[in-house]
Amino acid sequence: MLLVFDVGNTNIVLGIYKDDTLVTHWRVMTDRDKTTDEYGMLLQSLIASRGIVGEDITAIIISCVVPPVVPTLEQMCKTYFNIAPLFVGPDINLGMPIKYDNPKEVGADRIVNAVAAYAKYRRSLIIIDLGTATTFDYITPQGEYLGGAIAPGISISSEALFQKASKLPRVGFTSPRQVVGRDTVSSMQSGLVYGYIGLVDGLVTRMKKEVKSDPYVVATGGFATLIASHSETINEVDELLTLKGLKIIYDRNVGI
């Protein structure tokens, strides 16, 4: 079985593949202060809850955008699974040319998403990952990663509004009944939700005009379903896109 990790700034999404089937997956909080043993015990508990034992895990691949967590997870894999994990980066076989000016600057999660989406669609794409940051990535019709845009994530925007405007409360990120809010909470929710949808649709529209290739737009990440339900530009949501990409990259480098 293959254990895959997508380590983001807020959450870690992880899953287990048996051959080509994702048999289970979880989302846990990223904690930079957790020790090797704490991560090891957490992971063993999650795996055991699905009737899987540590010996069933024969390989591990990790995509990580939080550098302080890398040595902790690497040691955890060696200690609890006796496996040296494969880390995603520009120095391994991605099966996709990275046309960024400096390929090492591209977040591993962005590369993994691009690989997964192009493997499925084989056409030009815009991939939107609605996580701690919201990233927009363009893939050419030839399957090249060209670049994209990075914006503050939804939760960052909401928290900044609460912290910097002293009279405004902290609100949940849910769709209000109408755009014109009749109270403070619904007004904030309108600004956050519909404002963010405007950001997404505006950037996608501008990217399409620039690249002139009619890309298919795929969204992933924790807020993808909510945003896509109101967006005029998102074609499809795939919340497990990154895990699929990790499996593809593992197979290209090591195989089963």
Image (cartoon, helix red, strand yellow):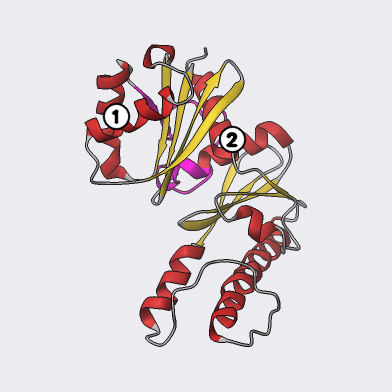
Q: Which amino acid does label 2 sit on?
A: Val
User: Residues at badges 2 and 1 in contact (C-beta under 8 Å)?
Assistant: no
Q: What residue type is labelled 1?
A: Met
Instruction: Residue 92: give x, y in percent of width and height.
Output: 44, 27
Q: What stretch is highlighted in magenta?
A: 85-110
Instruction: Give the class, few, some or many, for how many residues have Cα within 10 Å of label 2's Cα (few <14, many ≥20).
Output: many
Q: Is the magenta stretch mostly helix, strand or loop?
A: loop
Instruction: Residue 85: give x, y in percent of width and height.
Output: 36, 23
Q: In this view, does 238 lie above or below 224?
A: above
Q: In the figure, residue 176 lies in which quadrant?
A: bottom right
Horizontally, is 27 left or right of 222 in the view? left
Could you tell me which secondary element the residue under label 1 belongs to?
helix
Q: Please tell me the numbered disc located at residue 41.
A: 1
Could you tell me which secondary element the residue under label 2 belongs to?
helix
* Depth check, front residue: 180 or 198: 180
* Depth check, front residue: 102 or 189: 189
Q: Is residue 49 above or below residue 65?
A: above
* Depth check, front residue: 173 or 141: 173
From the viewer's perspective, is the residue at label 2 or at label 1 nearer?
Answer: 1
Indicate whether residue 94 is drawn in magenta: yes
Residue at the image position 30 percent from the left and 15 percent from the top: 82
Q: In this view, does 92 lie above or below 165?
A: above
* Depth check, front residue: 132 or 208: 132
Residue 143 in sight from this viewpoint = no
Instruction: Residue 171: give x, y in percent of width and height.
Output: 49, 72
Residue at the image position 27 percent from the left and 27 percent from the top: 76
Residue at the image position 66 percent from the left and 36 percent from the top: 118
Q: In the figure, residue 241 lies in which quadrant?
A: top right
Indicate whether residue 70 is drawn in magenta: no
**Would you name the residue on which mark 2 appears?**
115
First-in-chain label (2 vs 1): 1
